[in-house]
Amino acid sequence: MKKTLLATVLASLLLSSTALSAAVYKVDPSHSTVGFKVKHMMISTVTGKFNNFNGTYDLDKGVFKSLSGAIKADSIDTGIVKRDDHLRSADFFDVVKFGDINFVMTSATKSKMTGNLTIHGITKKVVLDIDMGGVVEDPWGNQRSGFVLTGQINRKDFGLNWNKAIEAGGVVVGDEVKLVVEVEGIAE
């Protein structure tokens, strides 16, 4: 009797942990951030984020089976209205012509994700580091998972070429952009 009860409890735990790990998730924008960092004047760093984005991903035992996301380019937010307006202009994102930024995963391991990133109408392969946060059940019975993707791109690869030289040498905006995407998703 004890062995049967113990076996039932163990089987139940194994099945529930499997159920908590395999699912398709929808990104929860209220608990996620799509951010970036770029050098300014070669001496400091400007941080920013996008406020309007969505995505879905399929996660099975901590490994991504698929992931895709879309960002509204006009939702860029660096905290400075004048700078944000310039970033929305034809000098950078040209949001009237290229309204969306898209990412579609092509492959993943437990620590790296490769995918196609489209910015300004140009698609390039990027590799991002994965930091898995885990899978939990929230107090309302929803299954949630969390992770962080980080990486670096060259903005000029995507046609974001605007810049100005500075007298001391160097340029106003750095070419390398660090990406930091922090995601919490809810199982569908």
Image (cartoon, grey):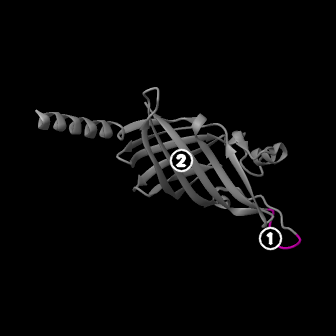
Task: Tell which residue pokes out farthest to the front in this image.
Answer: 2
In the rendering, at what x and y percent does residue 176 appear? Answer: 67, 63
Residue bounds of the magenta highlight: 167-172
Residue at image x 64%, y 36%? 52
Query: Would you say 49 lies left or right of 4 here?
Result: right
Which of pointers 1 and 2 lies earlier in the amino acid sequence? 2
Q: Quadrant of the N terminus?
A: top left
Residue 57's quadrant in the figure? top left
The verdict on residue 171 being magenta is yes
**Residue that label 1 marks:** 170
Q: Which amino acid does label 1 sit on?
A: Gly
Query: Would you say 104 lies left or right of 176 here?
Result: left
In the rendering, at what x and y percent does residue 188 appear? Answer: 43, 30
In the depicted view, which residue is nearer to us: 3 or 76?
A: 3
Number of residues whose C-alpha sits closer than 10 Å to that of mark 2, classed few (under 14), some (14–19) or many (20 or more): many
How many angstroms separate mark 1 from mark 2 (CA)?
31 Å
Residue at image x 61%, y 60%? 153
The verdict on residue 101 being magenta is no
Any mark on residue 103, and which?
2
Residue at image x 22%, y 35%? 9
Dot 1: what SS?
Answer: loop
Query: Would you say 39 lies left or right of 60 here?
Result: right
In the depicted view, which residue is nearer to us: 44 or 86?
A: 44
Dot 2: what SS?
Answer: strand
Q: Does the residue at mark 1 contact the one at mark 2 (Cβ under 8 Å)? A: no
In the rendering, at what x and y percent does residue 134 appear? Answer: 43, 45
In the rendering, at what x and y percent does residue 47 appear? Answer: 72, 52
